[in-house]
Each structure stands twice: as structure tokens, then as C-alpha cells.
Amino acid sequence: MSSESSPKPSLNLVPFVSVENMMETILDIGIGEMLTGIARYIEQDFTRWESFDKTPRVAAHSTRGVIELMPTSDGAEYAFKYVNGHPKNMREGLQTVTAFGVLADVDTGYPLLISEMTLLTALRTAAMSAVAAKYLAPEGAETMAIIGNGAQAEFQALAFRTLLGIDRLRLYDIDPAATEKCARNLAGQGFEITTCDSAEAAVEGAQILTTVTADKQYATILTDNMVGSGVHINAIGGDCPGKTELHRDILLRSDIFVEYPPQTRIEGEIQQLAADHPVTELWQVIAGQAEGRRNARQVTLFDSVGFAIEDFSALRYLRDQLARTGRYEMLDMIADPDDPRDLFGMVLRAEVKR
Ligand code: NAD
């Protein structure tokens, strides 16, 4: 690790974590420790849920995908993420999901950190899933099916192993090349991996079912007969209006846990249900105000769509690691003339120096 010290508070320079520096950060800290750290920050922030400003993310839909802004604040710090979701991108050699984000100081409004968030989103999504499963998965779970073996899949696997000790994986993707890639990337990491040729085969004997596919339409990745009693479903891929992964009958016999109901009712699996269908807010389970799993036969569903507070937690975690890793550069982001009112004079002085 670099011995550079903490980013110096500066009026116009803002620490920026590029994709390259994010990769170095992951390698320096270790992905297991990073997932554990982000999970800890998520749990802290979910425990103080009521102190955050919350709003469903602001989405701009097109026929090809969605671009979203995800803001939140705890009154001291503010964060937003820009993120897209374009299922057709993968066929064109582009990422389905890319993101970047900002953490800012509420007092001055000045940014504190700018970061790539494509990798950070994969980490925080996986950490969030594992935190949910900590409260919802059946006791003694050892095996997870992962249906959809694209960009998020390995992160999910590693978070579940790190936080819950899940070390048996059953992988399936409609594209065998994706499954091959996932199995190859996870080889030698202590997993027992079974590659499967159907979703039905993948769920056999699994106590945790993760669906993480991408399709901009109502899809049925799991049908009711594939979900045995007592399993925990970690549904990640249904995260947009019109984009779901589970048959409605599964929802009707599951206890459903969500991040922020006003957003999940629009974007999650529960868009298939009546607007007053009962759900439990995950933060209440984490804060000890609601029950998670109650018995061994219950089907639990984490209807994940990804919420702004998780990104806030991930950015807060990253900011707190900068001094230790030194993996950032300073960006000249804020016009900050010596006399705050003399913005134009700053341009004139720059001309003299040319
Ligand atoms: P990706 O395009 O890299 O991977 C998706 C994989 O799903 C592909 O390999 C594709 O072949 C496979 N797939 C598509 N239809 C399938 C089917 N019917 N059965 C089995 N496999 C199928 O995408 P990604 O970055 O891994 O993201 C996956 C999904 O997760 C996306 O829908 C994305 O929007 C969502 N996502 C959710 C969150 C969250 O917080 N809930 C965060 C990040 C991404």
C-alpha cells in the first residue's frame, strides 16, 4: 500500500478514485475485508435509517435501458450515484451497469469524494445481499444457486462466502460462456462449484437462490415449483418497472423484505402485487424492530433493487480507506477564487498567466 497520507482538505481539489485505483484498492485491502467493511457500514446506516432523507431514485427510461440518479443525505453528508441499466449493452460488448458517484459535505455543499462506482456497486450490492441473508437465510445454509452469471455474480458468491460461509455454488446462465467465466474466476477460492444446464438443475439442494439476470421485460427465472419450503431467495435482477424475475405465485407464499417500499413498489418483484401487499422493511429487521426469519419452513425473499443509502455507505467506507490506501488522485473540480465574488477575475488572471 502507498504510504500517502489522508487527502488534505483543499478548497478546489477533490479526491477522485478512478477505476484503476478502485481495482488497486480492492487488491490492497482484499475483497473479503472490503465486502465485510461495506456490509458493516450498511448495517450502521440501516440502523439509523430514520435520520436519512429518502426518495425513490429518479429514472429516465428509454426503450433500451434506464439512467438513474440516486440521492440521499444524513444531514451531515450527502451522496448521489449516477447509474445506468442497459441489458442489451452486454451483446454489444458494453457493461449492463456502469456508475459513478459523489460524497459531499452538507455544511459547505463542497464534494468530499468522487468515485467510479461500477465496481463499487457490485461490491455494495453483494454486501447488501449478504447482510439481508444474515437475517433471512435458513440456519446451516451451505449451498447457493446463482442464476445469471454475468458481472455481479462473482461478487455475490464472495460476499456470501465471506459473511455467511456459503461455499457450495450451483451456477446457471442461458449463456454457457458466462457460467464458464464465473466458474473460472472463482476457481481456487475454496468453493465447491457445480455448473448446471438449467435453472431447475441449479436450484436442486440449494438453500439460497440468487437470481441476477438482466432482461428488460417481465421474465420468469424461477417458477413456483422450483422454490421449496425454507429457502431464501435473493432476487437482484428485477430492478426496473417491467423488469422482474420471479413468478407471481412465489411472491404470494413468501415473506417479502425490501429496502425502501416507495421505490421497490415501482421497481421490484412486488410491482406484480397489489400496492398494499404487506412487506417488511429490512432496516427494521437490522435495527431489531421487526422479525427476520421466524422458522425453518418459511420462504423468505429479499426483493433487492438497490437503494441510495447503500451507495452512501459504500462511499463513506471508501472515503475512510483513502488515508490507508493512498489510491486516489486530486481533481481540480471546484472553481474557488481567493475572493469568492471574483469568479470572472479568476479567468482574467488565468489569461495573464498563459
Ligand atoms: P450482466 O448483463 O453482466 O449479466 C446478466 C446475465 O444474466 C448474463 O450473463 C445473461 O446471459 C444472463 N441471463 C439473462 N437472461 C437469463 C435467463 N433467463 N436465465 C439465466 N440467465 C440469464 O448484468 P449484471 O451487471 O450482472 O446485472 C445483473 C442484473 O442485476 C441486472 O438486471 C442489473 O440491473 C441488476 N442489478 C441489481 C442491483 C441491485 O442492487 N439490486 C445492482 C446491480 C445490478
Image (tube, rainbow, N blue to C red):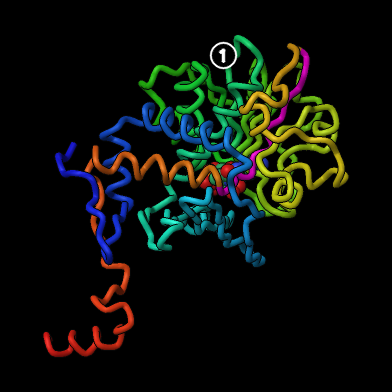
Kindly identify the residue that appears in the image at 33 percent across and 51 percent down: 19
User: Residue 10 lies in what quarter of the image?
Assistant: bottom left
Q: Which x, y percent locates residue 337? A: 26, 77
The boundaries of the magenta stretch are 297-308
Can I make out residue 201 in this image?
Answer: no
Any part of residue 103 in sight: yes
Q: Residue at x 37, y 53 (%)?
A: 115
At horizontal 38% and vertical 27% (from top left) the residue drawn is: 32
Q: Is residue 302 magenta?
A: yes
* Residue farthest along the top direction in this orientation: 140
Q: Position of residue 195 (x, y in %)?
A: 54, 25
The one nearer the camera, 303 or 263, is 263
In the displayed structure, 354 sits above or below 161; it is below
- Quadrant for the C terminus in the image: bottom left
Q: Is residue 81 left or right of residue 174?
A: left
Dot 1, how many residues are within 10 Å of its Cα: few (below 14), some (14-19), or many (20+)?
some
Q: Is 5 left, or right, of 24 in this rendering?
A: left
- Mark 1 residue type: Glu
Q: Is residue 286 above or below residue 268?
A: above
Q: Magenta span has 275?
A: no
Point out residue 215 in the picture as x, y percentages from the top left corner. 65, 50
